[in-house]
Image (spheres, grey):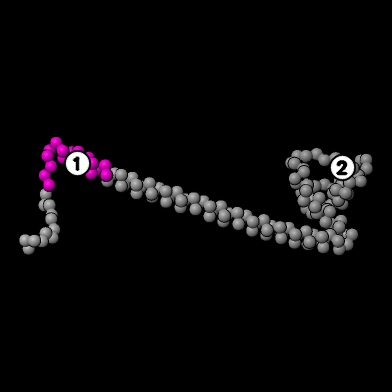
Amino acid sequence: MFGIELLDIRFKRINYNDSVRPKIYDRMISERRQIAERFLSEGNGEAARIRGNRVRELNKIQSEAYRQVEEICGVANAKASEIYATAYNQSPTSVAFYEFTRTMQACPAIIANNTTLVFSTESDLFKFLKGMTPTHQDGPAPVQEGPQ
C-alpha cells in the first residue's frame, strides 16, 4: 500500500524484568531436561531391544551347536558300536578278549585303593590273575593254589 514491504524482524536483545528472569531460565532448563530424558528413554529402549536380540541370537547359536554336538556324538557312538560288533563277532577268541578288556576297564571304577578281594577259584578274573607272571623283580608275587 505504501510501497514498504517488511521482510524480517530480528531481536538483538530481550531484557526481562529481574523478577521474571529466574522463572524463564528455570522453564528453559526444564524443557531441555525433558528433551534429554526423552532421548535417554528412547536410547534405553533401543539398548534393551539390542540386548534382547543378542540374548536370543546367543541362545539360538548355543542350541544349534548343542544339536550338532549331539548329532556328531550319535554318529560316533553308532560307528564305535559297529566296530565293536564287528570285532566281537569275529571268533570265540575275540569274544573272550573283548569280555576280558571290558572287565579290566571296569575294575578301576569298582575297586578302590587298599581293597581286599576274595575270588572263587572258578572266577575268570582269578584265573587271569593266577596266570600272570611278574615282568620285573618288584612286581606282585604270583598267586599260588593249594595249601602251603
**Quick one: which residue is furthest to the top in this view?**
19
The secondary structure making up most of the magenta span is helix
Per the rendering, the mark at residue 119 is 2
Placement of the N terminus among the 4 image quadrants? bottom left
The disc placed on residue 35 is none
Please identify the quarter of the rendering in which residue 6 is found. Answer: bottom left
Q: Residue furthest right?
A: 146
Amino acid type, label 2 = Phe
**Residue 112 in view here:** yes
Q: What residue lies at 78% left-to-right and 39% top-to-bottom?
A: 115
Q: Position of residue 144 (x, y in %)?
A: 89, 45
Is residue 130 in view?
no
Q: Position of residue 74 (x, y in %)?
A: 71, 57
Picture residue at 16% right of the left edge, 38% below the top: 20
Mark sitting on residue 24: 1
For the residue pair 144 and 115, the one nearer the viewer reads as 115
Is 15 covered by the magenta stretch? yes
Task: Confirm whether the magenta stretch covers residue 74.
Answer: no
Would you say 38 lies left or right of 16 here?
Answer: right
Inspect the image, locate mark 1, and give the three-letter code of the amino acid beneath it. Ile
- Residue 77 x/y as whole percent: 73, 58
- State the residue in front, 54 or 89: 54
**CA distance for labels 1 and 2:** 101 Å
Q: Residues within 10 Å of mark 2 (few under 14, many from 20)?
A: few
> Residue at left 45%, top 48%?
48
Residue located at (6% from left, 61% from top): 2
Write down the region rendered in magenta: 14-31
Is 113 or 14 nearer to us in this picture? Answer: 14
Q: Which quadrant holds the C terminus?
A: top right
Q: Secondary structure at mark 2?
A: loop
